[in-house]
Amino acid sequence: MPWFYLAAANGFYHSDLHADAIPPGAKGIGDELHAQLLQGQADGLCIQPGADGLPVLVPRSALAPTVPQKISRAQGRAALFRAGLWPQVLAYVAAIEDPADQFEADNALNHTTDWERQSPFLKRSAQHLGLTEAEMDQLFITASQIVP
């Protein structure tokens, strides 16, 4: 079999091109399957690893959305409002006793241009609100789709 597929890289390797550089764990696939996958991709489908580690075609809608690492403040505020979390966020910031910490929280919440997914303030806020990483990811995905 000249074609190989490595699920971890979601990539193809050809024995004539890559010879000794085909990574361990790459699985051999036939020319026919490779051609079907490329045609499916040309038809608007996506190639992704199947449960058995071999490539499969899936509709774009079946792919997990990418979590943006940055959203605008307006998008973040709108997403929190739509999720019913805005009052809790305001209460959390108001309850911060240390003046320096409250200043930083207010600055992050109200005066930055963008919100970063890995922001220490956002992480503390999420923890205080009892939000999981997956819930924070979903808030960022939702926020990224809001056009303020």
Image (cartoon, rainbow, N blue to C red):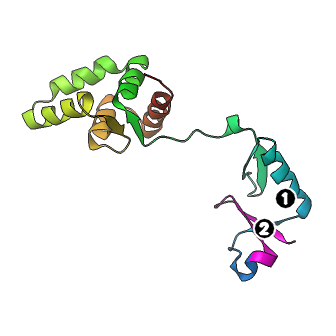
Q: Relative to residue 12, is residue 115 drawn left or right?
A: left
Q: Which residues are magenta?
A: 1-17
The vertical placement of 78 against 10, above or below, is above
Can you say which quadrant of the picture contains the C terminus? top left
The image quarter in which residue 105 lies: top left
Q: Earlier in the sequence, mark 1 or mark 2?
A: 2
Tell me where residue 43 appears, x and y as whole percent. Answer: 81, 42
The vertical placement of 106 against 11, above or below, is above
Residue pointed to by mark 1: 34
Which residue is situated farthest in the bottom direction here? 20
Mark 1 falls on what kind of element? helix
Kindly identify the residue that appears in the image at 42 percent across and 36 percent down: 132
Tell me where residue 24 appears, x and y as whole percent. Answer: 68, 74
Q: Residues within 10 Å of mark 2 (few under 14, many from 20)?
A: many
Q: Relative to residue 132, is residue 64 drawn left or right?
A: right
Q: Amino acid at mark 2?
A: Phe
Residue closer to the observer: 107 or 7 = 107
Kindly identify the residue that appears in the image at 74 percent across and 38 percent down: 59
Residue closer to the observer: 109 or 114 = 114
Q: Is residue 89 magenta-colored?
A: no
Mark 2 falls on what kind of element? strand
The vertical placement of 122 against 16, above or below, is above
Residue pointed to by mark 2: 4
Q: Amino acid at mark 1?
A: His
Tell me where residue 12 appears, x and y as whole percent. Answer: 74, 64
Whole-number angstrom distance, CA of label 1 to CA of label 2: 9 Å
Q: Residues within 10 Å of mark 1 (few under 14, many from 20)?
A: some
The image quarter in which residue 116 lies: top left
